[in-house]
Amino acid sequence: MTARAGVVGFRGYSGAELVAILDRHPKVEPWLLEHRTDAGEKPRPQNAKTYPRVPCSAEVVRKERLAVVFLATPPEVSMELAPAMLEAGAKVVDLSGAFRLRTADNYANWYKEQHTQPELLAEAVYGLPEFYRQHISKARLVANPGCYPTAASLAIRPLVASAAADRSAGIVCDAKSGVSGAGRKPSLKTSFCEVTENFSAYSILNHRHVPEVLMNCGLDEKEFSFVAHLLPLDRGILETVYFRLSPGVDEATLASVYEKWYGHEPFVRLYEPGQVPDLHAVRRTNFCDIGLRADPKTGRGVVVAAIDNLVKGAAGQAVQNMNLMLGYPETEGLL
């Protein structure tokens, strides 16, 4: 039997990607939950595949026995909908930032808004399977990570945990993303004429994704500098992490650290020392590719991580989390 998976926000970039992945999943049937009836849609061919479309309500979720509901919605909408979906008996995977941080005070500090569901915020499990797989499998509410923190956390945590990086020198993450990371809502900043043949930095040192990296990697804010940049591309994230090597650490040592952490992970691919990934390598996949360089003579180290922001950075990771929550093989529908 197939499980029914509801998708709220299916018209957005992450939501549409999610529906496409679920359509290929052998054990899940996507259902479209209509939350905004006034939202326009693109023209579709007459023979285009259709999915069950129902109102987004707890009554419908309960009646139709949806096993899981994905919220590809803004944080305030996720906070509004999550309690009702859980009460209706569905597990919830939230793709917004509503439930990623552990306290309401931390959320207010970074999102500049009050959190309306502090009890659920405390209950939610952070959905980065490579770190929290066992907790995710038991959860009823999972906060899907941000796209930037997915790549950054996978790149940085092994450095910190193994003490391969000299934390007293700080860690710098230079991150670049395609335009789809900003969502589908029109804005001047993401319009074609502003983006094409251009390259810009934004949210310097105060990006709302920073606390996720600090939380996952055990860093203090004073130890971590993060700057996001907008690439004139539709999708993809590439992050270059700069740090100082701890005494005695060389390229072979770093390679062994990452092999220990990710050698058996299905969605992390490691490159030979000295080689690094690019965006073409991960486009439309759920992989995070990681490469590294180290120069013990000067004490410099660099780690490069690449993901597709709409897949491993959003919809693909959400399905990875769903698989764990519903007891399916973690790679189902993703490889």
Image: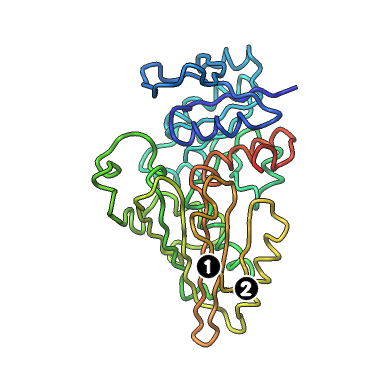
Q: Is residue 320 above or below residue 210?
A: above
Q: Quadrant of residue 216?
A: bottom right
Helix, strand or loop at mark 2: helix
Residue 309 in the image, given as x and y percentages of width and height: 48, 47
Helix, strand or loop at mark 1: strand
Quadrant containing the N terminus is top right
Residue under circle 1? Answer: 303
Q: Quadrant of residue 51?
A: top right
> What residue is rendered at 29% in x and 48% in y?
195
Callout 1 environment at 10 Å: few (<14), some (14 to 19), or many (20+)? many
Residue 147 in the image, given as x and y percentages of width and height: 49, 48
Quadrant containing the C terminus is top right
Callout 2 environment at 10 Å: few (<14), some (14 to 19), or many (20+)? many
Residue under circle 2? Answer: 254
The first of marks 1 and 2 along the sequence is 2
> What residue is rendered at 31% in x and 57% in y?
201
Residue 278 in the image, given as x and y percentages of width and height: 50, 59
Disc 1 to disc 2, C-alpha distance: 10 Å
Residue type marked 2: Leu
Residue 158 in the image, given as x and y percentages of width and height: 61, 65
> What residue is rendered at 46% in x and 76% in y?
169
> What residue is rendered at 55% in x and 63% in y?
156
- Residue ranking furthest to the bottom: 297
Horizontal side, residue 271 vs residue 241: left or right: right
Q: Is residue 46 above or below residue 334?
A: above
Q: Is residue 282 above or below residue 137?
A: below
The reply to whether the C-beta atoms of the residues labelled 1 and 2 are less than 8 Å apart is: yes
Q: Nearer the viewer, residue 219 or 329?
A: 329
